[in-house]
Image (tube, grey):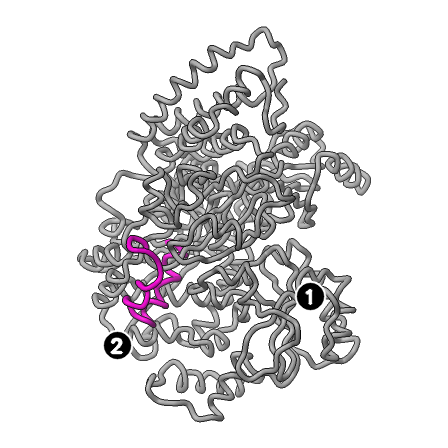
């Protein structure tokens, strides 16, 4: 594992505690999530105990500990989207996908994430799937959006 | 542009803008060259596409590609620029076109399918019907007939654009365009003419207060750091912006990253900080990209780094990417995060300005606070104090969202009433629904209801109704919004974001959340539902809220019960019908 991360560590040669978050970001950008082995390798590189690195990683919402699905669904749940019904969509997505926000389904097809304001409040409620935006989404749209994605699979 | 030309422009700008004596008049040909760099005058058509996050979501990337293809297919020599956003995000994708000798003109809702008809006409100096939203005023160019000026549109006419003037107008990352518009001049003048303590006292006299929620006098904070003896001082720009309803900091950084860099430089000089951090959220990928690009351009220009413009001043700026935690808005938590630890706050005093990052004096300022600084240094404290009210000076930025017709980012002078904003800037409510309340950020306190709409945007005046200006969210809700569901959403947010260090916040947010769950979810077995018990619980939670307010370590815990308390205060009947009648008056919660 350490050899997998070697090129990342080379870019953070200082080995200071302040590098923990940048390195974790870097690892996650490349692998999509942080595995147990990643955390252990980072702790060895920085010469900081594993529980300190793991403690930092689990504290922040950005870090994920399992791979994303093939289709990563981001639901904007900013206040503006909430008042236009984003939370109803969230309940529906959780029901239909049978996962909670922040999880990935068993098949690895869908993962669901709640994000704060994306910045297009007039198009609310807003869903982003693998970089593509769906605006003014209604409860009825959810099934057709998901069916289409399942069809692509 | 060739290297030689770039070098020429650089030397020209240094001589005629940055180091120019303000009393010396520019020669006419230099003036013309300056106009040319700032795009006030063009010799070939120029097209800007608004490419901020708001534009991208609305489809600006497709529009941009389509325009590029159009220009290539027709072999047209036209400059195409990725621009920022003027604040009116509801007309995105926005395309601005400037023809030689004509005023720059803005076109709204230009999705990719409209590119062809738009360009076909405009490049022949004709206007297609219904596309144009306004034109920019200029002295030397001819105006378009029957098209209003941008500044006269109701959304803009009621604003006081002091700090966001250049948003959406200039090429965000171009250092030359920024300097040609007067940028970095404040910084160069400051380091050449003022001592750090003079800068601190000018900022103190201007009565600039922190815009991140703390409302602390900025000049005072700087003086404390400056007077604390230490071999190293740090400056931190807080660009975490984690309120789920606001994005004006992101808007500023995306639209004019150089302005933030200039502000950070002045603040670092004033506090004798040789290292400055811009702590920004990882998800703001476009902001980070533009900021990095702008930093590089400024470095190459010699505006950052070692011995800036031979003044002996050394300042380095480092971008730190945060990892999403609402509590990072608290300065002590933010410092911990930069040090690579969990973002947990610690007790104050000592304040970070005395002992912060790695136990060294550290000034933490919000983006919006800092953005005011170059302007104050340019025009003086007295000029700055002219805008605003007796107790609050300057302007305030807000992010407008919710059930309104317009949405985006706007800047008003302190003292503007909420009614004015609602009627003019937000242009009323969607589908003419009845107004219910304005929510100023998730932790601001009281709601702005119908009864207090005539209150002003003012720190002191809002205190009288138990509110603060908050983070700058401005969410408007109508009669079809369930306030209990909204408060429930807030309680869930706080439960997730409580860092867990102090007990009142950790346990209190959990209790609040559970209470709201009972009120807003359906009971499968109605026999187990005991409304009186729930109501009794609510009475107890009112007591608990007071404990949270009194004893929580940081503002997160102190403000967490606000939504609950004010919902009970203003919308008690909604609460009661949820609990006793199992009915949601706004027809949002499915509980009966």
What secondary structure characterizes most of the magenta part?
Answer: helix
Quarter of the picture containing the C terminus of chain B is top right
- Tell me the residue that label 2 is attached to: B193
Coordinates of residue B3 in the picture (x, y in percent): 54, 84
- Tell me the residue that label 1 is attached to: B64
**Which region of the structure is painted magenta?**
B366-392
Q: Residue at x 49, y 77 (%)?
A: B176
Question: Could you classify mark 2 by the number of other residues whose Cα lies within 10 Å: few (under 14), some (14-19), or many (20 or more)?
Answer: few
Say if residue B481 shows up in the picture: yes
Q: Residue at x 53, y 22 (%)?
A: B517
Residue B378 covered by magenta stretch:
yes
Quarter of the picture containing the N terminus of chain B is bottom right
Residue B212 covered by magenta stretch:
no
Coordinates of residue B466 in the picture (x, y in percent): 35, 37
Above/below status of B536 relative to B438 = above
Q: Which mark is residue B182?
A: none
Say if residue B282 shows up in the picture: no
Question: Could you classify mark 1 by the number of other residues whose Cα lies within 10 Å: few (under 14), some (14-19), or many (20 or more)?
Answer: many
Give residue B225's quadrant in the image: bottom left
Q: Chain of mark 2?
A: B
Above/below status of A113 relative to A118 = above
SS class of the residue under badge 2? Answer: helix
Coordinates of residue B541 in the picture (x, y in percent): 39, 21
- Between residue B8 and residue B165, name the one nearer to us: B165
């Amino acid at each position: 594992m350490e050899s997998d991360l070697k090129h990342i560590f080379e870019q953070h040669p200082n080995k200071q505690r302040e590098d923990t978050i940048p390195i974790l970001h870097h690892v996650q950008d490349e692998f999509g999530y942080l595995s147990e082995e990643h955390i252990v390798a980072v702790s060895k590189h920085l010469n900081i105990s594993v529980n300190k690195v793991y403690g930092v990683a689990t504290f922040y919402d950005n870090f994920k500990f399992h791979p994303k699905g093939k289709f990563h669904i981001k639901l904007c749940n900013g206040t503006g989207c909430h008042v236009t019904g984003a939370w109803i969509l969230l309940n529906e997505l959780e029901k239909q996908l049978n996962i909670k926000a922040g999880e990935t389904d068993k098949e690895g097809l869908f993962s669901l994430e709640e994000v704060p304001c994306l910045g297009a409040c007039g198009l609310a409620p807003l869903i982003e799937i693998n970089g593509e935006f769906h605006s003014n989404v209604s409860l009825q749209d959810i099934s057709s959006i998901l069916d289409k994605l399942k069809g692509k699979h | 542009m060739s290297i030689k030309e770039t070098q020429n422009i650089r030397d020209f700008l240094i001589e005629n803008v940055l180091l120019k004596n303000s009393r010396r008049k520019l020669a006419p040909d230099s003036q013309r060259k300056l106009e040319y760099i700032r795009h006030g005058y063009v010799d070939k058509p120029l097209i800007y596409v608004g490419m901020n996050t708001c534009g991208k979501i609305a489809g600006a990337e497709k529009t941009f590609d389509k325009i590029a293809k159009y220009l290539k297919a027709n072999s047209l020599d036209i400059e195409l620029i990725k621009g920022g956003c003027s604040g009116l995000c509801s007309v995105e994708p926005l395309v601005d076109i400037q023809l030689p000798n004509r005023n720059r003109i803005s076109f709204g809702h230009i999705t990719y399918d409209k590119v062809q008809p738009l360009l076909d006409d405009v490049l022949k100096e004709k206007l297609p019907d219904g596309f144009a939203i306004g034109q920019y005023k200029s002295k030397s160019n001819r105006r378009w007939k029957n098209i209003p000026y941008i500044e006269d549109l109701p959304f803009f006419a009621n604003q006081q654009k002091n700090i966001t003037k250049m948003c959406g107008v200039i090429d965000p990352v171009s250092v030359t365009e920024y300097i040609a518009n007067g940028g970095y001049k404040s910084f160069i003048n400051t380091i050449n003419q003022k001592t750090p303590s003079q800068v601190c006292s000018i900022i103190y006299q201007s009565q600039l207060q922190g815009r991140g929620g703390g409302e602390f006098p900025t000049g005072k904070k700087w003086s404390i750091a400056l007077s604390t003896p230490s071999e190293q001082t740090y400056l931190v720009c807080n660009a975490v912006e984690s309120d789920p309803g606001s994005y004006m900091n992101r808007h500023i950084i995306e639209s004019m990253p150089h302005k933030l860099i200039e502000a950070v430089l002045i603040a670092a000089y004033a506090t004798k900080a040789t290292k400055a951090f811009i702590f920004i959220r990882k998800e703001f990928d476009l902001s980070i990209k533009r900021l990095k690009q702008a930093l590089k351009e400024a470095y190459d220009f010699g505006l950052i780094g070692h011995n800036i413009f031979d003044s002996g001043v050394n300042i380095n700026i480092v971008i730190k990417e945060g990892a999403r935690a609402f509590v990072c808005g608290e300065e002590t938590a933010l410092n911990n995060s930069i040090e690579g630890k969990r973002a947990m706050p610690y007790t104050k005093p000592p304040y970070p300005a005395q002992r912060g990052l790695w136990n060294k004096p550290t000034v933490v300022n919000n983006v919006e606070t800092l953005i005011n600084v170059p302007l104050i240094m340019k025009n003086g404290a007295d000029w700055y104090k002219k805008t605003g009210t007796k107790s609050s000076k300057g302007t305030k930025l807000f992010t407008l969202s919710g059930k309104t017709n317009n949405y985006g980012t706007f800047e008003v002078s302190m003292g503007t009433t909420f009614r004015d904003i609602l009627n003019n800037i937000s242009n009323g409510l969607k589908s003419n629904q009845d107004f219910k309340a304005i929510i100023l950020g998730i932790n601001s306190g009281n709601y702005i209801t119908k009864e207090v709409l005539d209150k002003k945007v003012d720190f002191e005046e809002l205190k009288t109704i138990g509110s603060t200006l908050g983070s700058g969210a401005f969410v408007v809700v109508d009669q079809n919004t369930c306030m209990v569901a909204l408060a429930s959403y807030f309680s869930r947010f706080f439960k997730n974001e409580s860092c867990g260090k102090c007990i009142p916040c950790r346990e209190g947010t959990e209790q609040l959340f559970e209470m709201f769950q009972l009120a807003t979810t359906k009971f499968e077995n109605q026999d187990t539902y005991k409304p009186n018990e729930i109501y009794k619980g609510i009475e107890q939670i009112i007591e608990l809220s007071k404990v949270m307010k009194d004893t929580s370590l940081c503002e997160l815990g102190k403000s967490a019960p606000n939504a609950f308390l004010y919902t009970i205060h203003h919308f008690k009947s909604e609460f009661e019908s949820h609990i006793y009648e199992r009915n949601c008056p706004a027809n949002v919660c499915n509980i009966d």
